[in-house]
Image: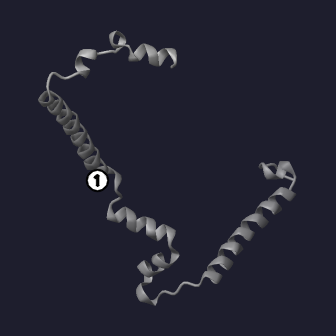
């Protein structure tokens, strides 16, 4: 046995030993239900807090769905008439990316003086 467990198993070193042993089963039962009641109230309070503040509201869910899903965004803007073509969407985004990259490369070809507002 380890020294600490031997020390704690000794009755005189047990902290709050008078509160551990109950005089009767009724006192133990009462103490048990106090602990259970406090735990239950804490859990109910935490659940109420989560329901009130942690769940997103329907308008937040709607906004997130519009941001995440291009299909849903088109449906919201145009109704049933909208059609989403993933291939065209990729081509458009790639075109915009290439424009940005070409502009950056063109700017980097200039001398540093021209890039930072000097005249060359």
**Residue 97 x, y percent position in the rendering:** 70, 68
**Which residue lies most toward the front here?**
1
Q: Is residue 65 toward the left or the right of residue 86 in the image?
A: left
Q: Residue at x 46, y 77 (%)?
A: 72
**Residue 33 x, y percent position in the rendering:** 17, 36
Number of numbered discs on residues:
1
Q: Is residue 30 above or below residue 48?
A: above
**Residue 17 x, y percent position in the rendering:** 28, 16
Secondary structure, mark 1, is helix
Q: Which residue is mark 1?
A: 51
Q: Is residue 34 toward the left or the right of residue 91 in the image?
A: left
**Which residue lies most toward the left here?**
26
Q: Is residue 61 toward the left or the right of residue 31 in the image?
A: right
Q: Residue at x 61, y 81 (%)?
A: 86
**Residue 53 x, y percent position in the rendering:** 31, 50
**Residue 39 appears in which quarter of the rendering?**
top left
Which of 59 and 26 lies nearest the eye of the viewer?
26
**How is the protein colored in the picture?**
one colour
How many C-alpha atoms fall within 10 Å of the one at disc 1: few (<14), some, or many (≥20)? few
Q: Residue at x 51, y 19 (%)?
A: 1
Which of 11 and 96 lies nearest the eye of the viewer?
11
**Which residue lies most toward the top here?**
12
């Amino acid at each position: 046995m380890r020294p600490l467990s031997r020390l704690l198993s000794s009755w005189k070193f047990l902290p709050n030993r008078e509160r551990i042993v109950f005089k009767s089963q009724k006192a133990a039962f009462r103490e048990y239900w106090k602990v259970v009641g406090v735990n239950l109230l804490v859990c109910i309070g935490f659940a109420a807090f989560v329901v009130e503040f942690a769940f997103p509201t329907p308008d937040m869910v709607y906004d997130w769905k519009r941001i995440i899903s291009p299909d849903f965004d088109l449906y919201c803007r145009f109704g049933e008439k909208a059609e989403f073509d993933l291939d065209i969407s990729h081509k458009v985004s790639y075109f915009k990316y290439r424009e940005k990259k070409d502009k950056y490369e063109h700017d980097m070809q200039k001398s540093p003086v021209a890039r930072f507002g000097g005249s060359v």
